[in-house]
Image (tube, rainbow, N blue to C red):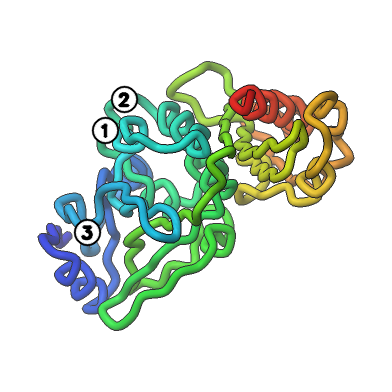
Amino acid sequence: MSYITATTLEDALNTLAAGPAAVIAGGTDWFPAQADRQFRGTLLDISRLSELRGITRTDNGWTIGAATTWTDIVNAELPAAFNGLKQAAREVGSVQIQNVGTVAGNLCNASPAADGVPPLLTLGAEVELATARMTRRLPLGEFLLGVRRTDRAEDELVTAIHIPAISPNSRGSFLKLGARKYLVISICMVAVLATVEQEKLSEIAIAIGAASPVALRLTALEDHLRNRPVTGMMRHVTADMIAGLSPIADIRASAEYRDAASAEVIRRALSLALEGNA
């Protein structure tokens, strides 16, 4: 095995251009996935790239560096629209995992139950990927292709996540259903971004994870709820409005249970977001 610690972004991109390499920052997903197998390839450690860490306000929104940790997210001063992302950050493994695990690593792992994906989907996140030759951006929903599959090429490195400007009236929420509160892979999880104006839901984004191969925006439900009065909103969240999910059955829950629980978790997450607008 070859172990390379990049000290500049250029070093990292040149290493990837030279041949395939597994990329780690915190390594909290990569190392457990190896189990007892011996890794014989090249391991590229980007944890020392300070230029990839941090959250900045831009003219067009917000930029989250790829090596930003979940603890960084928790501690950052962010508007209420990011409440869902902050809550998800608090539930990524243990505090020790949050201290070293990164936002981009969570996305690149491409687990259906990745905590960071639903809130980032509601925030309209775009993923920035760079090579030694070029940089490109694409929506998070297009970056995630399936279970453990992304659109990242072998010579590409995720360098940032971009969030567009969001109404100051928007409030986010995140709710995770599991056998216990922490250190658990979720049965299902929901993120909501809601904007209330004149007692009506003027804008709404809802994403659900662990109920399909990749987390999904529930656009039909969003369209159904948009511009409705806040009062009595929950009765409009019905099972037929979230049809089309394909939850798996595993040791944590049956597919039928995940399907039945989804509507209730959505109602509770929506209620949390609306309470934040009060």
Q: Are marks 3 and 1 in contact (CB under 8 Å)?
A: no
Q: Residue at x 41, y 27 (%)?
A: 90
Spatial CA span between label 2 and label 1: 6 Å
Rendered view: 86 above or below 167: above
Residue 254 percent location from the top left of the image = 72, 30
User: Is residue 247 visible from the viewing direction of this image?
Assistant: yes
Q: Nearer the viewer, residue 170 or 93?
A: 170
Please state, as top left, top right, bottom left or bottom right, where the N terminus lies in the image.
bottom left
Spatial CA span between label 3 and label 2: 25 Å
The residue pinned by badge 1 equals: 99
Q: Are marks 2 and 1 in contact (CB under 8 Å)?
A: yes
Q: Which mark is residue 199?
A: none
3 vs 2, front mark:
2
Q: Nearer the viewer, residue 99 or 83?
A: 83
Q: Quadrant of residue 40?
A: bottom left
Element type where label 3 sits in the image: strand
Rendered view: 32 above or below 123: above
Q: Which mark is residue 43?
A: 3
Q: Are marks 3 and 2 in contact (CB under 8 Å)?
A: no
Q: Residue at x 63, y 50 (%)?
A: 213
Question: Which comes before the other along the chain, label 3 or label 2?
Answer: 3
Residue 167 percent location from the top left of the image = 56, 46
Element type where label 2 sits in the image: helix
What's under tag 1, amino acid-wise? Answer: Asn
3 vs 1, front mark:
1
Spatial CA span between label 3 and label 1: 21 Å
